[in-house]
Amino acid sequence: MNRVLPVAALLLLVTLCLTSCGKVSTPGGSATPATSATPVGGTLKVGLNTELTGTIPVVGQSCKNAAEFAIKEVNDAGGLDVGGQKVQVELSVEDNEDKAESAAAVAQKLASGGVLAMIGPNASRNAIPAAEVAESSKMPMISPWSTNPKLTVDARSGQPKQYVFRAAFTDDFQGVVAAKFALGELKTKQPAVLYDVASEYNKGIAEIYKKTIEENGGKIVSFETYTTGDKDFSAQLTKIAKSGADTLFLPNYYSEVPLQVKQARQVGYQGKIFGSDSWGNEELVKLAGKDCEGLYFTTHYAADTATPKAQQFITAYKAAYNSVPDDVAALTYDSFGLLFAAVKTAGQLDREAVRTALAGITNYEGVTGNMQFKGTGDPVKSAVVIQIKDGKFKFFQTAQP
Amino acid sequence: MSFFLQQLLNAMQVGSVYALIALGYTMVYGILTMINFAHGDIFMVSTYLAFAASGLLLAHLGGASPLVIFVCTIVVAVLGTSLLAVLIERAAYKPLRNAPRMSAVITALGIGLLLENSFVAIKGIGPTPRMLPPLIPAGEVHVGGITISSLQLVIIGLALLTMLALDLTVRKTMLGIAMRAISWDHTIVPLMGVPKDRIISLTFALGAAVAAVGGTLYGMAYTIDPYMGIRIGWWAFISAVVGGIGNIRGAMLGGFILGFVEIFTPVVLKSSSYRDMIAFSLLLVLLIFRPTGILGRTVSQKV
């Protein structure tokens, strides 16, 4: 018995070495002499790091659908044009379980697994740790949905990260947009906020909202917090109702918002309620029903006022999955679009060249609007306000900070 | 004052659900001195049974009054959950009755994991959070500055009624007497003609039935998902220990105490992040100074 274990371990080690060596040596023999810097042979491998299980599984599913859709579109057209050659795209989908540590582990796995770039994760709480890995292993990463400013900034130096990009606007931008909307359109005098203090996204946006309101001469009457996974918010909402608030800002995820809206009304809060792009999922309406009627949120795009390019995407996506693409789907599609555009410009399947091409994109027309990168991983783009009417997301107005 | 009363009402609502689940922990411990760590997940299954039943009933009996549908939903959830608990007891715990106690506890944890993950894997359930359709007509009562919703009234009222019924069952009926007798002695009482295995199964069924009432009420107030049983299960377990595990009235008291912890932590400390810390500290302090809980008896063990 004592001898069996070391021998088995040795065998395992040898097998692992052989299989990994095998992977490196085989693609070299295939017919791709044009691109010498190719680390992955004749196919473009893209990794998807997304939240298939955990508290926001619908986000993960939308992201996966849109990713598969984008890849199928390119492959059906014969492949992507890279330096005069048609290259097929291959996707490897990984579940990060909506956990920060798994998101980082998945990023590590993809980085050493030979993908050219990684798309995802979506929630900032997962995207930020994954971005650390992407940056240190020099693998281009595009997060479709993460809006927290910390994603693209190096925590130590305060400089923009080199390999981390996103397709969404940032919380700084959205927090300011939400505050301007509350002061202007909703004419709030006594704003209140309830947010998840344990989640980067919610916390970041709530703080910028508060700061902007105060800079414009307002005062937050109640600034309440809860922790991810809580289901009873009645204690905090009772405080908010008692503070005499006239608007309640809920920059929280779609799975929690219906409970918060319902419980707010239950404890007697009668003011207006609005939120941020994390509301943008049909599940919200399914869960909240009539409770969410007439509420507003700021987001990336509105399916009912989309551009011709967006309309084309919406129609094709609907045909494929029988549902209207939500913002995650649209942003994931745009993330792949940005990546493909960069690969085309680079003309080779090389991480360094693709990174440089991504950073140099001056005008990309995406489904969620025109995007431009100006020296950081954050695109310059605009936001929209949506109102929920008859259980549907309806365009309300375009929003600029 | 009205602020405090409103929060008290919130605490009662949360506390009644904890109390209903804590009863299942305490009854099983009382009769087998075993912690059924799958109980939180059995509670989770009950919410899904209620979800499925209410959905189906609304689709097929749309014309019936919501009250009828509500009662039918509870009945389906209670029967289904009791059956599941008995099946689990027969298949997983009974074969281990003479094994070291730790084996049964670990089996219970395993059953819990099995339930959670199979619910995630089953197509049509998955990890997406869901909510029961509204079965209680919406409405509010305003009394002295506090708002009481119809849902809150139903949750607290029905929970208290269920607890009262259980307390009477255990103290007055033949089943209750048999349960208490078995918990007293496992060797002599069966010789007197008390069917030990059947009484143990019925204890599991009763605990699950009470949890299913809690599950239906919970599903109407909050969202449900396959992993919900973990946290609620822990809190209910702490409730049972705080009140005095093995003691039915203690479990009810413990449930309400934990409800107060849940609501008044964010009120007093400005952040709900401390909730778990306070709940588990309460458990630790109690285990150090009064290991039998608030209402528990001190037991001297013969060596």
Image (cartoon, helix red, strand yellow):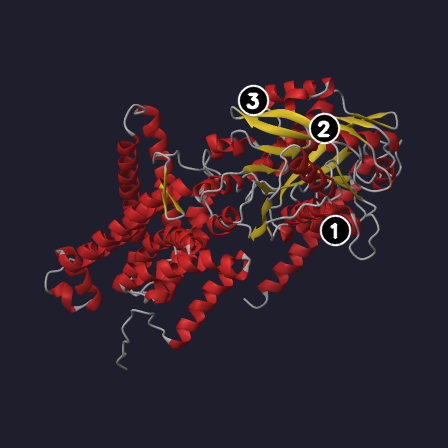
Of label 1 and label 3, which has the lower sequence position?
1
**Disc 1 target residue:** A133
Q: Position of residue A162 (x, y in %)?
A: 83, 46
Residue B100, position as x, y percentages in the image: 34, 67
Q: Looking at the picture, does residue A129 appear above or below residue A78?
A: below
Q: Is residue A128 left or right of residue A160?
A: left
Q: Secondary structure at mark 2?
A: loop
Quadrant in which the N terminus of chain B appears: bottom left
Q: Which mark is residue A368?
A: 2
**What is the distance, in whole Å, between disc 1 and disc 3 at their CAs?**
36 Å
Chain letter of mark 1 equals A
The percent coordinates of residue B176 (x first, y second) are 17, 58
User: Which quarter of the image is occupied by the C terminus of chain B?
Assistant: bottom left
Q: Secondary structure at mark 3?
A: loop
Q: Chain of mark 2?
A: A
User: Type of residue at label 1?
Assistant: Val
Question: Please, what is the three-letter code of the amino acid marked with disc 2?
Answer: Thr
